[in-house]
Image (cartoon, coloured by chain):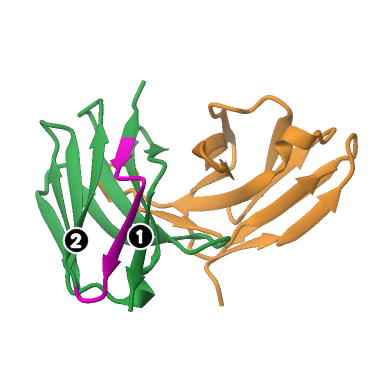
Chain colours: A green, B orange
Amino acid sequence: KQEVTQIPAALSVPEGENLVLNCSFTDSAIYNLQWFRQDPGKGLTSLLLIQSSQREQTSGRLNASLDKSSGRSTLYIAASQPGDSATYLCAVSNAGKSTFGDGTTLTVKP
Amino acid sequence: DADVTQTPRNRITKTGKRIMLECSQTKGHDRMYWYRQDPGLGLRLIYYSFDVKDINKGEISDGYSVSRQAQAKFSLSLESAIPNQTALYFCATSGAPGPYNEQFFGPGTRLTVL
């Protein structure tokens, strides 16, 4: 059974800092890995999707990497802003179903 | 307009009542999913459907049923609601299978069972 772990569970940083969020998974037989953002009480917004054959994806200040063999992904956020405060979830997909981590709650202090 | 919509957005009901949550999508996707989210337990898959004639149980389907009325509509029912079904419920869709299978989520329904 696939298990997805995100460390740390919570992170607080000052504005402007670069930061890395971690996601690990136990079964490397995945089709893709997706990073989401969730604001309190809201739905999930897709940030980046990395296909299993890819090593990384970039969107603006976000860069996600994937090392399938070691079962790890990182989400790098450059020059963090208070508006980046949210919970970030990763999900791995196989056979049309996804397994989610519990998320990392990020607080960026002005 | 939102691509994935859910109704109602909030619902308070009593134990034993039948509840239906509805999901509609305009993305033209074949695949639709129902999840629930609980603090400390993350997102868990309740049911999923790969097309109108294909319905599958997820990891926590007990106490729930679904109906796929059309490609664009997927409803979740609680036949007799109980308090531990209080949660945030999400509908999601995805398109082509395999590596391009990006999921898109609705805004969620907050359900409280008293």
Q: Is residue A73 magenta?
A: no
Residue drawn where x is 12% and y is 44% of the image = A53
Reading the image, the residue beneath label 1 is A106
* Letter of the chain that mark 1 sits on in the rendering: A
Image-quadrant location for residue A18: bottom left
The percent position of residue A13, horizontal first and vertical second, equals 27, 65
State which region is magenta. Answer: A5-16
Q: Is residue A7 magenta?
A: yes
The percent position of residue B70, horizontal first and vertical second, equals 64, 51
The percent position of residue B23, horizontal first and vertical second, equals 65, 55
User: What is the C-alpha distance between the residues marked 2 and 1?
Assistant: 10 Å
Label 2 is placed on what type of residue?
Answer: Leu
Of pointers 2 and 1, the one earlier in the residue sequence: 2
Residue drawn where x is 23% and y is 46% of the image = A22
* Letter of the chain that mark 2 sits on in the rendering: A
Reading the image, the residue beneath label 2 is A19
For the residue pair B30 and B79, the one nearer the viewer reads as B79
SS assignment at label 1: strand
Vertical order, A26 against A47 (above or below): above
SS assignment at label 2: strand
Estimate how packed mark 2 is, as few (under 14), some (14 to 19) or many (20 or more) residues with alpha carbons within 10 Å: some
Label 1 is placed on what type of residue?
Answer: Leu
Residue drawn where x is 16% and y is 59% of the image = A57
Question: Does any portion of residue B66 appear in the rendered image?
Answer: yes
Left or right: A7, with B63 as reference point = left
Residue drawn where x is 35% and y is 53% of the image = B102
Vertical order, B16 against A103 (above or below): above
Could you tell me if the residues under marks 2 and 1 are in contact, i.e. CB atoms within 8 Å?
A: yes
For the residue pair A79 and B33, the one nearer the viewer reads as A79
By secondary structure, the bulk of the magenta-drawn segment is best described as: strand
Left or right: A70, with B28 as reference point = left
Question: Does any portion of residue B22 appear in the rendered image?
Answer: no
